[in-house]
Structures are given as C-alpha cells and as structure tokens.
C-alpha cells in the first residue's frame, strides 16, 4: 500500500514580466522533501509506504515558461510512472500556476498523472486559499483541502487534513466526489481576511461541515486576480461521499459567499501613493510602514518601482526614511566596488548619494541569494537589490546591513505587512500604487476572465 508525495508551486502573475527561472524554485528530492511537507508520519502511521517525488516551490512571479514547468512536472510524472501501482497520491499545489501555452499547471499535471494511474488511485491535494480552481479539476483529483486562513498560517494543518482525507478514502474504499461551484466574484485579495467577518463565520461553517462523516472537505477559494484566465474567480469546492451532498453543500456555501460580496473593506489605511507619502511624513508615530502594494514582490511584481522613493526625495523631509528592496542589479553592480562612506552620483535620480552599506538579500527559503547596496540620500536611505526579493522580517534588514530601528518611515514592497514586521510598525499605510500587483481590479485590464464578474459587472446570481 503506497502513497506518492510531491509539491510543485508557483503563484503566477500574468502582469509580471519576470518568469521564474530554475534557480527561483526551492527544490528538494527524495526524503528531503519531508523537510518541507509534514504528511509523512501520518501516512506511515496509517501503514502506508511513502514514496517521495519532489518539492519545487518558487516565490510568486510571472507565468511559468513551458521548459521550466516541464523540468519539474516531468520529475513528478517519472515518479508516478515508477510507482503506477500507488494507492494514493498527495500533492501540495498553490492552485494558481499559469503556464505559457498550457494554462493551469496543476490541471495539466493531474491529467498526465491520471493517464498513468488507475481510477482507483485516490488523489488528494492541498491548495492555497487564493487558488483559481479550474472546472475540470474534479475529473482528475478526488479531494482538495484549501487553507482556511488569510493571511495564511495553516499550511501544515491543511496538509494534514488532505493527508487524513486520503487515508479515510483509502481505508473505507470510498471514492469521494468533488463538486466545484464557481462564484463569479473577484475581490481585492487584501480585503479578504479570515480573522474578520464575514469570512470568519463562513470558515467556521466549513469546519463544522467537515465534522460530518459524509463530508471530506468543504472549501472556500477566494481566487487570485492577477492571472488573466478563464478560471480566475472565487469558488467553493466540496468533497463528499456522494454527489448529492457535495453539490448541495457547495451551492449553499457559494450562495452565502456571494451574499457577502459587498461587505469587504480594507481594514487598514489604504490610500493613493501621494496621500500615503504625505500621511507618513506628517504622522507622529515612532515608526510608520508604507507598503508599495502595486509593486509587491510577494505577489509576483518586479519590485523595481522607485516612485515612492522619488516622492520622498522631493519632499525635503527631515524624517529618517528607508525604502527597502528595490530591484536594480545594474545599480548594485555599478557601485559595488565603492567603499562605505564614498560619494557616488546616481544618474536616474540626478542626485549625489553616499554608499552606506554592502549587504545581502534573502530568498524565499531564507537562503542568501545575492547582494544589496544601501545608498543614503541625506536622511533617506534606499536599499537596492540585485535580485527580486521581499523584506518581510527584521532579518532582511539585518542581512542588508541597515538598522531597521533607526528609521521613522519604512517603505517595503508588500501588500499587508507580514506578521514578523508588525511589532516594528506603530502605524501601517497601504499605498494603492500601480504595478503588476495593483489591487484595483478595474485597472487590471482583465480580458480572459468569465463575465459577468462582480464587481466589474453588477448582476443577480444564484448557484
Ligand atoms: Zn494565498
């Protein structure tokens, strides 16, 4: 009795111009994948042999190029071919991987896997709450367990739920039925938080439903608006012992989710870039964070925008300011040989600056991935990075050799601040900037999504 385990994830952003490269994927093979996946013990305790394939996970980026996709997809397919007698397959996906010329990377892989294994083989998935579920997913997978938290804190629990569902199906000999109900809304991801109402209550309801013997999983997927594709939208997905239950529960959840569509609001100050800069400069708090949400590298954007830095430079403020994590490999290279304290002239701003510090940037797995250079424009420091990166915790500043605690205003390329930065922020302002991760739906120019779609269209709907 054996179960194959794998993970392949990259949240795509069709507006981002940088496609993930092979080195962007954190990669493990064989037993090492269980440094990242927590399902091994559960399967082994239930008496199954566990066959590891690969773990390949990248920071969100542009769509995945075909050759990069196949590098990893083929490794998983190979493992399945070598173990085509597997009783079950467990895969941890993101659910919003868009592959050039292929579309949903998850769907393609599942189709290939189903060509190899029998119908009896139970396929169970974990997916991010922002997955764009394809209608066909139910033809190739049996169970899906999505995260129940946004921001995500239950990745481990979601893996364990999917693993336990897989064991339950195998032990009972039952083949769960998956019902997918598309919900035609697409909202600003950053307004949908599960610790707030109405999602808090809806998520609690899914947990209650999952207590029922006939229901394997009940999920709300909120969709991911930065992919322009027909499967981009929210959905509810229910996996149950019979079709009737799966269908009625999914429809009921979908109607409840739809009914909440007009309620979602930002829970923090969300303002235009100019207003955000103005508020940060006027604010009396010890340290104010401003997030450049349209250029959010954790949502696939490039992190190249200097719009906010330039506004600070023009302001003549005396506040101590840091703009962290601007992707600019040319600038880092051009000034890398300068010593700390040396003066340089930065053409793109037409200004002199002083080299403040040479440092490092961290990748998604917290490994060192490149160099950073901090330039001081008087009281305003800018940290330039030679690769796209995200300043999500104090350690990023430490590695870049800048003292986070010395600043009164800090700009990072995020949407909401990561939990790890919150203790350092006396106030948080969400700047509604343009860019690949712009949160203003009407400005995204989505052409391939299904219509009508709320809030782009105003219409009545019922599942
Ligand atoms: Zn997500």
Image (cartoon, rainbow, N blue to C red):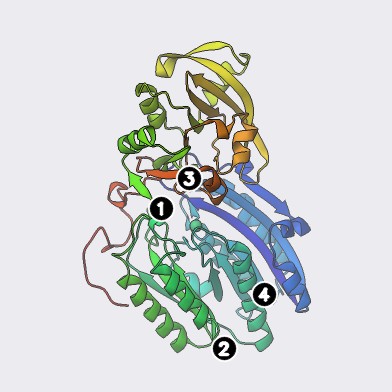
Residue located beneath label 2 in the image: 213
Residue 308 spot, x, y in % from top left: 39, 31
Residue at 54% across / 11% down in the picture?
Answer: 343
Q: Which secondary structure lies at badge 3? A: loop
Task: Tell me the CA gap for discs 3 and 2.
Answer: 40 Å
Q: In which quarter of the image is residue 438?
A: top left
Task: Tell me the CA gap for discs 3 and 4.
Answer: 32 Å
Q: Which secondary structure lies at badge 4? A: strand
Task: Tell me the CA gap for discs 4 and 1.
Answer: 30 Å
Residue 39 spot, x, y in % from top left: 70, 68
Q: Which of 344 and 222 is in front in this view?
A: 344
Residue located beneath label 4 in the image: 88
Residue located beneath label 1 in the image: 227
Beta carbon of the mark 3 residue lies under 8 A of ligand 1: no
Task: Tell me the CA gap for discs 4 and 2.
Answer: 20 Å
Mark 1 crowdedness (10 Å alpha carbons): few <14, some 14-19, many ≥20: many
Foreground label between 3 and 4: 3
Q: Compared to 77, does 244 lie above or below?
A: below
Residue located beneath label 3 in the image: 300
């Amino acid at each position: 009795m054996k179960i194959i385990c794998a993970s392949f994830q990259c949240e795509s952003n069709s507006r981002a111009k940088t496609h993930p490269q092979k080195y962007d994927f954190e990669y493990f093979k064989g037993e090492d994948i269980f440094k990242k996946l927590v399902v091994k013990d559960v399967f082994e305790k239930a008496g199954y042999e566990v066959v590891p394939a690969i773990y390949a996970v990248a920071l969100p980026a542009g769509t995945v190029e075909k050759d990069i996709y196949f590098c990893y997809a083929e490794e998983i397919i190979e493992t399945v071919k070598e173990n085509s007698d597997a009783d079950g397959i467990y895969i941890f996906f993101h659910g919003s991987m868009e592959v050039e010329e292929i579309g949903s990377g998850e769907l393609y892989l599942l189709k290939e896997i189903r060509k190899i294994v029998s119908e009896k083989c139970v396929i169970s998935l974990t997916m991010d709450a922002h997955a764009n579920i394809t209608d066909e997913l139910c033809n190739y997978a049996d169970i899906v367990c999505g995260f129940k938290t946004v921001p995500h804190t239950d990745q481990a629990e979601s893996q364990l739920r999917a693993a336990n569902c897989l064991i339950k199906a195998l032990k009972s000999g039952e083949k769960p039925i998956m019902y997918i109900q598309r919900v035609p809304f697409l909202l600003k991801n950053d307004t949908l938080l599960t610790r707030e109402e109405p999602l808090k209550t809806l998520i609690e309801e899914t947990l209650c439903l999952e207590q029922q013997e006939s229901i394997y999983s009940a999920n709300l997927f909120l969709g991911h608006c930065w992919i322009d594709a027909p499967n981009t939208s929210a959905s509810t997905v229910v996996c149950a012992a019979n079709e009737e239950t799966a269908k009625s529960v999914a429809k009921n959840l979908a109607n409840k989710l739809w009914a909440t569509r007009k309620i979602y609001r930002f829970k923090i100050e969300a303002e235009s870039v100019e207003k955000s800069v103005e508020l940060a400069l006027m604010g009396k708090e010890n340290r104010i964070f401003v997030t450049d949400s349209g250029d959010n590298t954790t949502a696939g954007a490039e992190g190249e925008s200097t719009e906010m830095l330039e506004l600070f430079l023009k302001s003549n403020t005396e506040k101590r300011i840091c703009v962290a994590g601007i992707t600019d490999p040319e600038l880092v290279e051009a000034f890398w040989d300068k010593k700390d304290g040396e003066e340089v002239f930065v053409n793109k701003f037409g200004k002199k600056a002083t080299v403040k510090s040479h440092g490092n940037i961290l990748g998604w797995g917290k490994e060192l991935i490149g160099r950073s250079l901090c330039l001081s424009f008087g009281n305003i420091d800018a940290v330039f990075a030679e690769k796209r990166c995200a300043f999500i915790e104090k350690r990023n500043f430490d590695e870049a050799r800048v003292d986070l605690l010395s600043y009164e205003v800090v700009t990072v390329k995020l949407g909401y601040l990561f939990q790890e930065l919150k203790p350092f922020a006396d106030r948080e302002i969400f700047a509604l900037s343009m860019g690949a991760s712009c949160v203003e739906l009407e400005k995204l120019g989505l052409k391939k999504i299904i219509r009508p779609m709320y809030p782009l269209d105003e219409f009545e709907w019922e599942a």
